[in-house]
Image (spheres, rainbow, N blue to C red):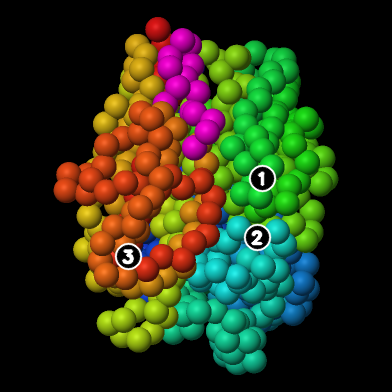
Amino acid sequence: MLRSPRLADQLLALRIFQNRLVSVAEEMGEVLMRTAFSPNIKERRDFSCAVFDAAGRLLAQAAHIPVHLGAMPLAARAALDAAAPEGWQPGDVMALNDPYAGGTHLPDLTMLSPVFAGAAHRARGRRQLLGFVASRAHQADIGGMSPGSMPLATELIQEGVIVPPIKLLERGQWNRAALALLLRNVRTPEERLGDLEAQVAAHRTGERRLAEVAARYAPAAWRRHVAALLAYAERLARRALQAIPPGTYTFTDWLDDDGFGSGPLRVQVAITVTADGRLIADFAGSAPQTLGPMNAVLAVTTSAVAYCVRCLAGEDLPANAGAMAPIEVRAPQGSLANAQPPRAVCGGNVETSQRIVDVVFGALAQALPGRIPAASQGTMNNLTIGGTDPRTGRPFAYYETIGGGAGAGPEGPGLSGIHVHMSNTLNTPVEALEFAYPLRVLEYALRRGSGGRGRHRGGDGLRRVIELQAGATVTLLCERRQMAPWGLAGGEPGRPGRSWLRRRSPGGRWLDAQPARDGADAPPAGLAAPEEELPGKVTMRLEPGDILGIETPGGGGWGL
């Protein structure tokens, strides 16, 4: 049906307005990436940026990390509740990382700063609060019981410094006491300060750019455009959901374990789709919260469900509060999908979130068999290494998530060696990794044949082999080591991941270790010493010359 010229003009104006807001978030991300100190931000780009209105409603976000952005509105609400509107001043920056106040896990530090309009938007000479800009960046260390702050913990307090909503900057000046307290409780304070200053620099850019966008519109026109953009996104989201046959669809998948002997852990969802375009995701039936760090807070669960809806709706759906309006997430308090204090949560953010995506897509595959792909690798393969760099005498903390295979779909094979679903980072390039840390990469390649077979084959995982050049504490937090990524429509599952270790003795010879399990991948050429098979979740002390291998899962196959 042809649109009227007037309607087409209105839609064009709305799209221009939307893209201007998105460009603010995108430019913030560029500033953050270019000015950060840590490879985790400047190389891997483990950060996200967004724009909110004065009421704390999400208006726009850059195409950064899905698990960050779906949860950030809850963090914005916590920050607004902690500072009444009359308490905001130009130059203020609120910071928080508390997962039970809208955060995801402690390394993800969220900042929120107010944006005030120019003279055209002032009411009776008073400064007008236009909205907020926000960023969330993964700090490579935020304290806690192990370097990298991704430990096998049983309580949140063990995972790092818990930052409630506090003003880290007031009227443009650092809160020196709060900053000193934070930096004193991390292992790499100089790097942390550099990354914090990079976040602030991104906010200053975002504040200027958002004020410039607002200056293009009269106050009444600005309010109309904001309302119209949110309403437009809700209409598109409902339209996408109305294409799903109404009904209730249930799916169950499992996490391997919690790192403390409990497992497998059930993740179950019942997706109800209504005729008027609403989606209710109910996680009743999922396992109770567990001793280990695999618990997801409700913000993470909501983020994963919203991501799945966005995938269905397509790229034209504006990523704002309107797009989330037709979505309702229910999860029993004290469950794996809605953990309560003081439970540890770092793995819930990075691993359980992936399984939540798997079960939501698994349920939707029953309603839309021709659109949903098989399971992707279903893990971020988290690796942290920390110690003292012998080249400088300074502490270091390295964090990495490692890509794997994407699930095949009705239209073709899955991609190989990529980050999937709730992770959208890059890898740390070998040159950057070896320059920044006392580590040597011996091998980095696709894990051929790890994707599930089918009419369309799942993508292959990756193989990364790292030699330590210094003694260090190493933590692995990985999934899909026992429960393989499932295939769909008759396709075979992808191969589970595995991790292994070869130790050197103090004299440089290989120590005896357990042989690799039957059917395991062959070791790299020239490294025929026995391998010690590692569990998916482990913290260990390694010495110079020890070699760590990580082989990530392949994606499931699709079709017979």
Extreme residue toward the top, this view: 560
User: Which residue is at a point 74% across and 57% down the rendered structure image?
Assistant: 343
In the rendered view, tell whether residue 543 sits above or below residue 445.
Answer: below
Residue 54 % position (x, y): 67, 63
The stretch of residues the image draws in magenta is: 481-494
Task: Determine whether the residue tagged by mark 2 lies in a helix, strand or loop.
Answer: loop
In the rendered view, tell whether residue 332 sits above or below residue 366.
Answer: below
Residue 505, label in figure = 3
**CA distance for labels 1 and 3:** 30 Å
Residue 153, label in figure = 2
- Residue 541 in the magenta stretch? The answer is no
Say few, some or many: other residues with alpha carbon within 10 Å of mark 1 (under 14 / 14 to 19 / 20 or more): few
Of the numbered discs 2 and 3, the one sitting upstream in the chain is 2
Quarter that holds the C terminus: top left
Q: Tell me whether the residue at label 2 lies in contact with that at label 3, contact meaning CB atoms closer than 8 angstroms.
A: no
User: Which residue is at a point 38% across and 72% down the rendered structure image?
Assistant: 471
Of the numbered discs 1 and 2, the one sitting upstream in the chain is 2
